[in-house]
Image (tube, rainbow, N blue to C red):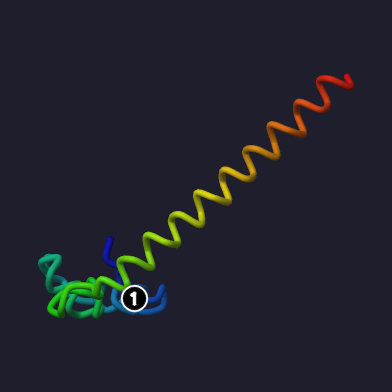
Amino acid sequence: MPALNQPSKEQVRAYMRRRLGARQPPPAPEEIRRQLAWRHRHSGSAPPSPASIALQGWLVSVDLAWLGTLLLLSWYIEGSFVENG
């Protein structure tokens, strides 16, 4: 999933103040994104490298390992309370 370059809250508030002063219909979404410099990080550039994709996959596997470990510990601790109950 490509990362987004989002404008800060202050930039959005300043944009909204400018828009309130203009008595016109709102511009197209593409124009709003252009004015706020809000676009996908990979848009208009080369696709992500295989190394960055591999890194993302590795990070997901680490997260899943952590989740599995926590679930196993939770199951083990809960089972020990039931036996000693």
Classify 73 as above or below 45.
above
Q: Quadrant of residue 10?
A: bottom left
Image quadrant in which you'd find residue 6: bottom left
Quadrant where the C terminus lies? Answer: top right
Q: Please provide percent x and percent y for residue 40.
A: 23, 71
Q: Nearer the viewer, residue 16 or 74?
A: 74
User: At label 1, which amino acid type do we have?
Assistant: Pro
Q: Position of residue 14 (x, y in %)?
A: 34, 79
- Mark 1 is surrounded, within 10 Å at the Cα level, by few (under 14), some (14 to 19) or many (20 or more) other residues, namely some
Q: Nearer the viewer, residue 11 or 69?
A: 69
Residue bearing mark 1: 7
Q: Count all numbered tags in the image, as a single digit.
A: 1
Q: Position of residue 39 (x, y in %)?
A: 22, 73
Horizontal arrangement in the rendering, residue 31 relative to residue 53 (left or right): left
Residue ID at (24%, 80%): 37
The residue positioned 30% from the left and 69% from the top of the image is 4
Outermost residue, right side: 84
Q: Residue at x 28, y 60 (%)?
A: 1
